[in-house]
């Protein structure tokens, strides 16, 4: 995520949570007309986001749609603090309750929540992933290392082994076609070499490439074990 978008996202998210909590205590003193206006602004931002949404906008290169969805989500949190204490239709209250439940997810995985509210895409902070075998996966890297930059039509993945709430990176910078839709395992012992076949569509047909991945091909020697962000 771009630094400016990250700072704006976490600032607005925390501000909406705190202001929503304060508003919930003083909701009886807030004019009902003003509350209805905030509800209208909330859904108006959703309409603007749907109309102007651009698939090229991303958390690394944000555009108008990123900021519209961020505003839409944060107004939802703020409104939720007030509506749950007022006599509004049950369905509307349940709708806004979803925004408050994001706090539970935020405690478990802040990056997943921030990535979603800054883009409207649930997988924006993690990228795509392919199951290989057992607890082994290809996970899309958020940035391609310098030696693999600007490879047209390819995406960079890392081979990881998941261990409950943590994962260990076994290899990095594995290039797969950007439109890969499935992976099959050919041969492996997951200690030295992994052989896979990647399938992808080409002009209404399916093609494939075979890859041999050397386990231990890291960009550094830290062999770090990290927590899985869910």
Image (cartoon, rainbow, N blue to C red):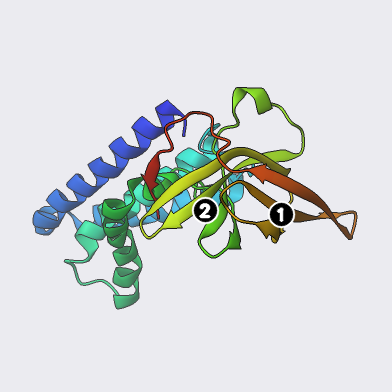
Q: What crowding class fits label 2: few (fewer than 14 Cα within 10 Å), some (14-19), or many (20 or more)? A: some
As rendered, which of 36 and 85 lies closer to the eye?
Answer: 85
Q: In this rendering, would 92 be left or right of 198?
A: left
The picture places residue 105, in percent across and down from the top left corner, at 32, 57
User: Hey, which residue is sitting farthest bottom in the picture?
Assistant: 90
Q: Residue at x 64, y 44 (%)?
A: 55
The picture places residue 23, in percent across and down from the top left corner, at 15, 51
Q: Residue at x 71, y 27 (%)?
A: 150
Q: In this rendering, would 112 be left or right of 219?
A: left
Note whether residue 125 is visible.
no
Residue 141 in which image quadrant: top right
Residue that mark 1 sits on: 196
Residue that mark 2 sits on: 47
Residue 203 in which image quadrant: bottom right
Q: Disc 1 versus disc 2: distance between alpha carbons?
A: 44 Å
100 vs 2: above or below: below
The picture places residue 207, in percent across and down from the top left corner, at 86, 55
Q: In this rendering, would 9 be left or right of 49?
A: left
As rendered, which of 227 and 80 lies closer to the eye?
Answer: 227
Asked which secondary structure carries label 1, the reply is strand
């Amino acid at each position: 995520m771009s630094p400016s978008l990250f700072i704006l996202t976490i600032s607005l998210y925390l501000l909406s949570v705190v202001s929503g909590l304060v508003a919930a205590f003083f909701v009886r003193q807030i004019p009902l007309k003003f509350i209805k206006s905030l509800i209208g602004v909330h859904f108006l931002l959703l309409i603007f986001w749907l109309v102007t949404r651009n698939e090229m906008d991303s958390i690394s290169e944000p555009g108008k749609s990123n900021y519209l969805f961020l505003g839409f989500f944060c107004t939802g949190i703020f409104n939720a603090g007030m509506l749950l204490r007022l006599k509004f239709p049950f369905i509307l209250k349940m709708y806004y309750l979803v925004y408050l439940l994001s706090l539970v997810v935020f405690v478990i995985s802040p990056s997943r929540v921030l990535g979603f509210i800054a883009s409207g895409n649930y997988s924006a902070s993690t990228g795509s992933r392919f199951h290989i075998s057992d607890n082994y996966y290809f996970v899309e890297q958020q940035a391609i290392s310098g030696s693999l930059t600007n490879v047209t039509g390819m995406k960079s993945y890392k081979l990881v082994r998941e261990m409950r709430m943590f994962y260990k990176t076994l290899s990095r910078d594995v290039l797969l076609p950007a439109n890969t839709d499935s992976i099959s395992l050919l041969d492996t012992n997951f200690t030295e070499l992994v052989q896979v076949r990647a399938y992808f569509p080409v002009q209404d047909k399916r093609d494939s490439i075979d890859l041999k991945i050397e386990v231990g091909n890291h960009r550094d020697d830290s062999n770090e074990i990290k927590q899985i962000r869910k």
